[in-house]
Image (cartoon, rainbow, N blue to C red):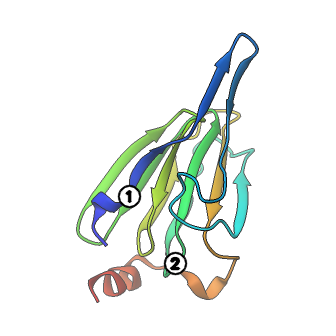
Amino acid sequence: MRIHEARIIELPRVLDARGSLSFVEAGGRVPFEIKRVFYIYEIPAGATRAGHAQRTCEQLIVAVSGAFDVISDDGSARSHRRLESAHRGFYVPPLTWLELENFTPGAVCLVLASEPYSEASYIRAYDQFKVAAAA
């Protein structure tokens, strides 16, 4: 994996006088079949989320409300992005170390994943991630 595989994906946005609507459809812009959806909310000030990599799972991260920073790392390079729009998602390929931080009050982070939850899929120690990423 190279850091350039992690990227922003534009989601459809329908805008009219009543507001905006964005959506995700199977077989659409998300480059994987969605097997799990979860969201992170009520994040305390100063909290950091993630701090891990996934062995085989792909993810799309969307700031559906508020904003936060996404730091992605492929073992040789790091990327820092601010997510602050509900019609842009950040694609995270497998074997990408991920950190989420600097959440605004009321932020909601939506995550679409290519696999059901499995603790065995997580790499939670950065030194172990570096070894896996180099292999």
- From the viewer's perspective, is residue 59 above or below residue 81? below
Q: Quadrant of the C terminus?
A: bottom left
Disc 1 marks which amino acid?
Ala
Residue under label 1: 6
Question: In the rendered image, which quarter contains the N terminus?
Answer: bottom left
Q: Residue at x 52, y 52 (%)?
A: 100
Question: Label 2, on which residue?
Answer: 124
From where the camera sits, is residue 49 visible? Answer: yes
89 on left or right of 41: left
- 98 or 85, which lies in front? 85
> How crowded is the residue under tag 1: few (<14 C-alpha within 10 Å), some, or many (20+)?
many
Q: Position of residue 105 (x, y in %)?
A: 66, 32
Q: Secondary structure at mark 1?
A: loop
| Picture residue at 55% right of the left edge, 32% below the top | 85
Indicate the secondary structure of the residue bearing disc 2. loop
Percent of width and height locating residue 73: 34, 64
Q: CA distance from mark 1 to mark 2?
A: 19 Å
Q: Nearer the viewer, residue 28 or 64?
A: 28
Q: Is residue 19 left or right of residue 28?
A: right
How many numbered circles are shown?
2
Type of the residue with mark 2 = Arg
Above or below, 56 relative to 103: below
**Sequence-first disc among 1 and 2:** 1
Location of residue 24 in the rendering, given as x and y in whole percent from the top left corner: 65, 48
Examine the rendered structure and indicate whether residue 88 appears above or below residue 80: above
> Going 68% across and 15% down the picture, which residue do you hit?
16
Q: Residue furthest top?
A: 17
Q: Quadrant of residue 134?
A: bottom left
